[in-house]
């Protein structure tokens, strides 16, 4: 995965001049485009955000959401329930459900595999929360991670699997791409012989709208290295995960 947080962008001396009178989103977007980088819904753009700018972006998003509520003919003046809704929703998007777009990757301490561990490790279920990039409806599910380390692998603490998964998932996503991003990130961090990721999730874009099917789930997996090449290892992982799910 091409991480956008590894090479910080240094603000140019005339950034303040360029930013004068422009929406903060336009300033950040211009930096990304000047670097010839993409800013898809599930990309991290923290590299291009300078200190203090998230607060300005929050104010901008609040203003735009107030306009959306106005266009929906929702009274935000005399209705006490909606007077602060635009601010609350703006904070929710920037600081919670889409936070993984705007903050750097969480620090992860890696340890050498001193004992030369080479047996299957499984972490999960990790609860993950995301949002469908088609309708911005919630995706709530579970993640299972299988690792086959080698003597040269870096090991990470148990909680760090959850932190890294949350960082990836806290963006507008489609599930297939999200699982691949988690696998890419962990594979890059640990360099194991094999890596497997399974995700099972409820999609509110199916249960809340559209067909309104509350029972359908989406399950997908990514297999790398020995999990892809060794059918016995793959079966062991899948059977253990299935047993735990049951």
Image: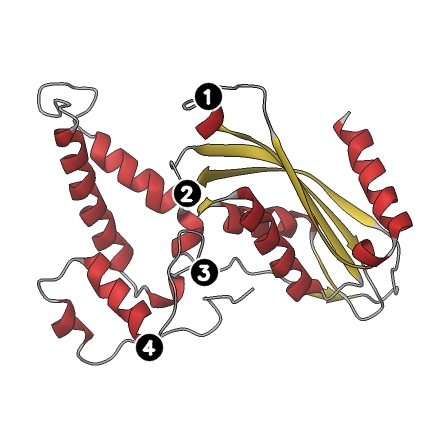
Earlier along the polypeptide chain: callout 4 or callout 3? 4
- The residue mark sitting in front, 2 or 3, is 2
The local secondary structure at tag 4 comes to loop
What whole-number distance in Å separates the C-alpha atoms at marks 4 and 3?
15 Å
> What numbered label is drawn on residue 197?
none
What whole-number distance in Å separates the C-alpha atoms at marks 2 and 3?
21 Å
Q: Of 246 and 126, which appears nearest the observer?
A: 246
Image location (x, y in percent) of residue 73? 13, 24
Image location (x, y in percent) of residue 42? 45, 52
Q: What residue is shown at x 61% (from left), y 46% (from top)?
A: 162
Q: Which residue is mark 2?
A: 133
Q: Is residue 170 above or below residue 227?
A: above
What whole-number distance in Å separates the C-alpha atoms at marks 2 and 4?
30 Å
Q: Which residue is mark 4?
A: 10
Q: Which residue is mark 1?
A: 211
**Farthest-out residue, right:** 232
Where the N terminus falls, by quadrant? bottom right
**Farthest-out residue, bottom:** 13
């Amino acid at each position: 995965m091409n991480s956008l947080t590894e090479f910080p962008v240094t603000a140019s001396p005339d950034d303040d001049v360029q930013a004068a009178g422009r929406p903060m989103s336009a300033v950040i977007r211009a930096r990304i485009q000047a670097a010839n980088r993409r800013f898809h819904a599930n990309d991290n753009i923290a590299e291009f955000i300078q200190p203090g700018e998230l607060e300005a972006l929050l104010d901008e998003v609040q203003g735009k959401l107030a306009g959306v509520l106005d266009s929906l003919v929702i009274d935000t003046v005399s209705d006490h329930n909606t007077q602060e809704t635009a601010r609350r929703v703006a904070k929710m998007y920037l600081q919670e459900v889409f936070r993984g777009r705007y903050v750097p990757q969480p620090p992860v301490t890696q340890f050498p595999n001193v004992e030369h561990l080479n047996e299957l490790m499984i972490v999960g279920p990790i609860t993950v929360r995301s949002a469908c990039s088609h309708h911005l409806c919630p995706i709530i599910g579970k993640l299972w991670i299988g690792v086959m380390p080698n003597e040269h692998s870096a090991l990470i603490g148990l909680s760090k699997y959850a932190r890294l998964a949350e960082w990836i998932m806290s963006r507008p996503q489609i599930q297939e791409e999200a699982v691949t991003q988690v696998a890419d990130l962990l594979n890059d961090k640990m360099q194991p012989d094999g890596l497997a990721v399974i995700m099972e999730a409820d999609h509110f874009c199916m249960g809340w709208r559209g067909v309104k099917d509350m029972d359908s789930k989406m399950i997908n997996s990514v297999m790398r290295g020995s999990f892809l090449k060794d059918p016995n290892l793959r079966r062991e992982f899948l059977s253990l995960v299935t047993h735990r799910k049951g």
